Each structure stands twice: as structure tokens, then as C-alpha cells.
Amino acid sequence: MSKETKRPATYADLEALPENVVGQIIDGELIVMPRPAGQHGAAHTALIGELYTPFQRGNGGPGGWWFMTEPELHFGDDVLVPDIAGWRIDRMPEDLSAPFFTLAPAWVCEVLSPSTAKLDRHRKSEIYAREGVGHVWLLDPVSRTLEVFQLRDAQWVRRGTWSGEVSVRAEPFEALELELARLWPRMPQPPRPP
């Protein structure tokens, strides 16, 4: 469900988009997608909740990280919006009032949906590698899987793939035992008839 332009896109194209969509510029193309569905948003929110306290606040964990949801990242002519990005505090961009960031995060998580999976896995991951992002997580709430990749010699190396409701220690947050069951949205059960 993406819409791509024929001419090289500009930042003015992004600014002209309605608020109910997410726009990115990748390889000169304006890519426009609707806001994510509920399952996507629930997994995204749950993951941020799991990481925030031990890694950003430092309660029950090592601290040292700063997370943002949907930050706008400018890498040359490319403008990407990952679902979640994390910077180590010692490398966090200094001006948090800026509308976008040019400093690559140390970690990115893309929550996959049927309309974004191919883009997230290929074109965006290639740009993250080019820019030196250390780790990429691909979280799929439909198949209930977490894939973890680490950048080595400008190539993504798979560090693990987990599914279901197992507990994992995944780089770069291996200090936390992450219960995958907490990330998957629970569908409300209809009331039982009397």
C-alpha cells in the first residue's frame, strides 16, 4: 500500500502530506503509508514499555540509553522513520528540539506489517547498514517473531530469531530477559452467553 512518485522527492513533499500518513524518502522516492494498525501499535508500545525502565531510566537495568518512537532520521537525501530508535546516552544528539536527527542511532526496531515488511527488510535495512546502525530488530506481531541483526563489516549478521512466547536475551539489550508474550497483543474474548 505504498505510493511512490516519479520525480525525485523533496522535503517539501513530506511537509505537504496529511497527518494521517507516514512519509519517507528512500533513494529519491516519496513513500507514503497509512498509520499502522492496532496490532502493530500494540506491539510497538509494549516493546518500548519493556525497554524504557531498565535501559533509559536505569531502574532494574544498566541504563545508558535514550529511546524515541518514530524519529525522523536524515541520512543524506534519505529520510527514514523507524518505529523505534535508541541511542546510547553518550552519543545522543544534543539538540532534542530539532525536528529530525542526522546522527544514526545505535539500535532500530521496525515493527513489520504486511504493507511495510519488504521495505523494512530490504531498502531501509540497507540504509541503516550504510549509516552504521549497530543493531536492527524486526518485530512481527502477526507471526509473533523477533529477528535480531548486528552490523559487522557493513553486513547484517543474524544474531537470533525467536517466536511465540519464549523469553530471550537479545543484543544489544541482553541484560534483560525479554518475555515475547508481553509483546503480542491479546485479542479481547467475546463475552460468553449466559
Image (cartoon, helix red, strand yellow):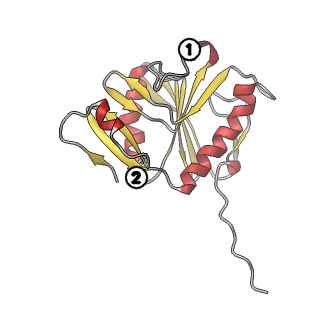
Q: Where does the image place residue 55, in percent across and percent down from the top left?
A: 70, 27
Residue 167 falls left or right of residue 29: right
How would you rate the neighbour count of disc 2 (Cα within 10 Å): few for under 14, some for 14-19, many for 20 or more?
few
Q: Residue furthest left?
A: 7
Quadrant assignment for the N terminus? bottom left
Residue at image point 69% right, 40% down: 49
- Secondary structure at numbered mark 2: loop
Q: Amino acid at mark 2?
A: Ser
Residue 164 falls left or right of residue 157: right
Q: Is residue 90 above or below residue 80?
A: above
Examine the image and state in which quarter residue 23 appears.
Answer: top left
Q: Using the image as rendered, state which of residue 132 and residue 79 is in the foreground.
A: 79
Q: Where does the image place residue 67, in percent across and percent down from the top left?
A: 61, 29
How would you rate the neighbour count of disc 1 (Cα within 10 Å): few for under 14, some for 14-19, many for 20 or more?
few
Residue at image point 45% right, 35% down: 81
Residue at image point 66% right, 45% down: 46
Residue 142 visible in this rendered orientation of the protein: no
- Residue, disc 1: 94
- Residue, disc 2: 115
- Secondary structure at numbered mark 1: loop
Residue 185 falls left or right of residue 107: right
Q: Where does the image place residue 164, in percent across and percent down from the top left?
A: 64, 53
Quadrant assignment for the C terminus? bottom right
Q: Are marks 1 and 2 in contact (CB under 8 Å)?
A: no
Q: Using the image as rendered, state which of residue 185 and residue 154 is in the foreground.
A: 185
Q: Residue furthest bottom?
A: 194
